[in-house]
Image (cartoon, rainbow, N blue to C red):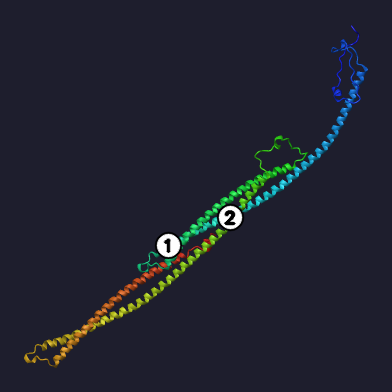
Amino acid sequence: MSSEVLVSRPRCDSRCGDRGAPGSQPPVQPSSGSATAGYRSAKYTPAEWFSNYHSILQQAAADRLAARSIQRESRTLKGDSEADTLSTQADGTRLLGERLQEIHCWKSELQRHIDRLQADTDSLLALKTRLEKALDATEAPFAIATDNLSCRARRPGPDLVRDSVEEELLKEVDLIRSVQALLKRTTAQVVTQIKMNRGAKQTLELDWSDKHQAYNHDEHSGRYGNTSPDTKHHPSSASMQDQVCDSTTWTKFTQDNLSQALHEEQTSHSLRVLVERVLRDTTKDLRAQCSRVDRAFSQRCAELTEAKTQLETKLAQILEQIGEQERNIISLEQAVHSKEAPLRVAQSRLYLRSLRPNMELCRDQPQLSLEGEVRQLDATLASLRLQLSEARGSLSHLEESRFALEKDISCKTQSLFIERDKCMTHRKRYPTVSALSGY
């Protein structure tokens, strides 16, 4: 056996053959023989030794050049990426600041309209209270008018007429009913508008709340820096979500909310003007009708007072005439009674003279005088009795007139009591202008 030691053949760096460094010599072919079957006992040749370390040097030089190129690229990339990163981060911070300003502007606009809607709602609530008070206040005039009509229905027969007072009272009742219906419709409109204002205000508040949270998140994210200790990796946050809206949709959403709020504000303003006009006009109409009714009552009372005065004056005259007629009747009765004795005397004389015998029964001058006296007395008594009958008939007519006058005076007194003491006194409780206006 040979004394030489068997060793493994070292592997050559494959990168040398791949790269093919210039000026390199071709590798030395190993010696052929039985030692080439996986192992050999021969040492490397000098050519293999030179080729091997030249290959290592060439590979080291190539690696060095490649490393220096990578280092230059790394420095360039590092600088560029650092600048880009800082620029991108600065742009993001600037955009976050601009976004914060935009959100703040929209928040301020939302808050302004929220305050205006709240003020409008408070005004409408106050107007609703005024409308309800005004509606309650119309109950008193309605009760007064219906009570006046009821009281005037109890007037005595001759005075139960459809006069101007009754016509004005009926107009007042119709006016109050129409005013009550108008106030109820206006109150319903105010209640509906209050609901609309509250709905618009709630929408704005939700939008404001969302923007407030977004503002806080953006402000917090704007405070993040490269040295912030509370930053973490959130890989999935950078992916775009399907339900996320774009800036145009975001802006339009708030603009639509503000447009709706502005519409409700304008409607509230128009409704406030309408309510004020309704309260003013209804109060004016009710007070004007009340004045017309009061004037009609005053005129009617004046007419009743004048009629009552005339009736009382005429009654006094009738009573005086009744007294005179009664005295005249007594005088006529006495006159008739005073003619009875002379008539009896004259008739007795004629009767006795009719008893004269034979030729003594003649129509002498005494006879003619007595017959004329009797005829005169009969005519006088007939005239007196006729006058007495006429006087008694006149007295009866005077009594009927007295009864009619007293009855009519009683009617006028009762009517005057109803008109002045009941109706007009009751009308003093008519609500004031401020009460009818809802204050």
Q: Quadrant of the N terminus?
A: top right
192 vs 257, left or right, is left
Q: Are marks 1 and 2 in contact (CB under 8 Å)?
A: no
Judging from the image, what secondary structure is the residue with disc 2 in?
Answer: helix
Q: Residue at x 72, y 48 (%)?
A: 101
Q: Residue at x 58, y 57 (%)?
A: 270
**Disc sitting over residue 147 in the figure:** 1
Task: Report the residue that reaches farthest toward the bottom.
Answer: 365
Q: Residues within 10 Å of mark 2 (few under 14, many from 20)?
A: many
**Label 2 is placed on what type of residue?**
Ser
Q: Which x, y percent locates residue 394?
A: 28, 78
Q: Residue at x 71, y 43 (%)?
A: 218
Of badges 1 and 2, the one in the foreground is 2
The relative height of residue 345 versus residue 290 in the rendered view (above or below) is: below
In the rendered image, which quarter is residue 304 located in?
bottom left
The relative height of residue 281 versus residue 316 in the rendered view (above or below) is: above
**Disc sitting over residue 268 in the figure:** 2
Q: Which x, y percent locates residue 202?
A: 60, 48
